[in-house]
């Protein structure tokens, strides 16, 4: 499948493979369409070959029978997929308020998230509470206003509720083409191209329809003004040229997303397969890689002194494959394959057969096999490095929330509750 924003894609990358990883969650109020968005993402990225439908209980992320029966997402599942040369590790987070602990654990291992809203209901109470949780964890977000095909759907009203109820600055980067049942596409206000979806779901990239040109220009102008107000480099260019060039706009949107100062808003209809490609492009363009977030902190046991000789019982672990290994267990589940321990590797490298330390329980654990989970299958890995999200077989007793680390460099990871995302100024 092809990406819709080649210009944005070219601005990302770099030689470090970690720069092309996105550890992503999808946050939403129940029924906003999180499962459908997840499905469409997995389908488009080739991670699943059969499109599941929520109503007939065949979706691949809601795999638990109890969950299917109740129609809500109870358990977080992780799946890796690929888009535009990037690996997206998708961590499903429960939308139901009864599972706040699971959401909390998932938020610890995410670097960024898509918040899904219903275009008719706007911001609902649970979206608000999950938004605050994500704020506490410093997780940068982009917003996807879903169900634009529904009667009564209105992007502007939904955006107003995002501004009012979430106390954030929404930066709307698309203009819908058509309303409700006639919603067929979007004008991308960054590239000023029209993206339309045929009934089969195939995306077409074309010129902005003449009738929408003035409105698209007006909204692009509003976007530029809002960005310039928040971003010093953008303001400088805006003052000098009375407009923002596309690369400056993209870089500023990326910085503002990562610093949490604003939220890029996209829209679509997941059910009708409209809007998912640009959403994935935005994930790649704006949300951070493991390199762009601060190193995790942990508490160390025993006496440690820093360079000045002051006792320091905390340590940082950078997202570096060569650093001592540290990872966080965020979910444990039993499957036919065995006990699967889902692990976010923050630093270092683990290899098949390694013995590691459960630092809190002071117990050794063995990394028997390492699996990259896809939606409907898995791949065996020889090793996993900093930034990875994998499932491990062989860990016998470590629970969700446990830190696994190199025995030579023990530490217990702290929840990154006050961590501020790093801003990379263009
Ligand atoms: P979740 O609870 O957030 O995971 O939401 P689901 O993905 O299960 O969606 C809830 C309901 O809304 C289901 O019946 C979906 O088929 C429906 N739905 C999801 N996306 C759309 C959309 O874009 N348009 C419309 N009209 N319905 C949708």
Image (spheres, grey):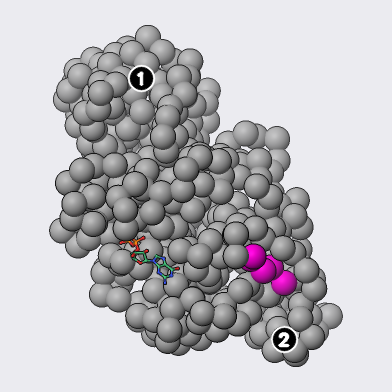
In front of the other: 190 or 349 = 190
Q: Is residue 235 above or below residue 109?
A: below
Q: Quadrant of the C terminus?
A: bottom right
Residue holding disc 1? 406
Q: Is residue 79 above or below residue 44?
A: above
Upstream in sequence: badge 1 or badge 2: 2
Q: Is residue 416 visible to us here?
A: no
**Residue range (magenta):** 194-198
Q: Residue 136's spot in the image, x, y percent?
A: 32, 60
Q: Residue 87's spot in the image, x, y percent?
A: 56, 39
Residue holding disc 2? 212
Determine the main secondary structure of the stretch shown in magenta: strand
| Helix, strand or loop for disc 2 | helix
Residue ID at (42%, 86%) = 152
Q: Is residue 407 above or below residue 270?
A: above
Q: Is residue 272 visible to us here?
A: yes
In front of the other: 29 or 177 = 177
Q: Is residue 205 above or below residue 165?
A: above
């Amino acid at each position: 499948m092809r990406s819709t924003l080649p210009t944005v894609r070219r601005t990302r990358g770099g030689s470090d493979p970690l720069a092309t990883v996105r550890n992503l969650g999808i946050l939403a109020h129940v029924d906003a369409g999180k499962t459908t968005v997840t499905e469409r993402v997995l389908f488009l990225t080739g991670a699943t070959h059969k499109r599941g439908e929520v109503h007939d209980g065949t979706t691949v992320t809601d795999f638990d029978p109890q969950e299917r029966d109740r129609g809500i997402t109870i358990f977080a599942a992780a799946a890796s997929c690929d888009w535009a040369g990037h690996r997206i590790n998708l961590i499903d987070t429960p939308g139901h308020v009864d599972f706040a602990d699971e959401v909390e654990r998932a938020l610890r291992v995410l670097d960024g998230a898509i918040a899904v809203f219903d275009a008719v209901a706007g911001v609902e109470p649970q979206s608000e509470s999950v938004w605050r949780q994500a704020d506490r964890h410093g997780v940068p977000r982009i917003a996807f206003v879903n169900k634009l095909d529904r009667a009564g759907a209105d992007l502007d009203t939904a955006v107003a509720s995002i501004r009012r109820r979430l106390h954030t600055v929404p930066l709307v980067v698309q203009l819908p083409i058509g309303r409700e049942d006639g919603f067929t596409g979007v004008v991308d206000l960054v590239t000023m191209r029209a993206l339309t979806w045929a009934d089969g779901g195939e995306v077409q990239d074309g010129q902005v329809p003449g009738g929408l040109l003035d409105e698209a220009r007006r909204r692009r102008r509003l976007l530029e003004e809002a960005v310039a107000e928040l971003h010093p480099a953008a303001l400088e260019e805006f003052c000098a040229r009375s407009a923002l060039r596309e690369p400056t706009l993209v870089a500023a949107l990326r910085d503002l997303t990562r610093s949490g100062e604003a939220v890029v808003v996209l829209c679509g209809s997941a059910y009708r397969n409209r809007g998912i490609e640009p959403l994935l492009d935005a994930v790649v363009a704006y949300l951070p890689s493991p390199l762009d977030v601060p190193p995790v902190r942990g508490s160390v046991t025993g006496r440690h002194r820093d360079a000045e000789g002051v006792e320091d019982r905390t340590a940082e672990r950078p997202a570096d494959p060569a650093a001592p290994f540290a990872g966080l267990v965020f979910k444990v589940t039993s499957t036919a394959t065995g006990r699967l321990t889902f692990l976010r590797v923050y630093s270092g490298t683990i290899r098949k057969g390694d013995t590691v330390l459960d630092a809190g329980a002071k117990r050794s654990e063995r990394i028997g096999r390492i699996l990259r989970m896809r939606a409907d299958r898995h791949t065996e890995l020889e090793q996993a490095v900093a930034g990875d999200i994998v499932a491990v077989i062989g860990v016998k007793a470590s629970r969700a929330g446990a830190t696994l680390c190199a025995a030579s460099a023990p530490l217990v990871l702290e929840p990154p509750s006050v961590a501020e995302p790093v801003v990379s100024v263009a």
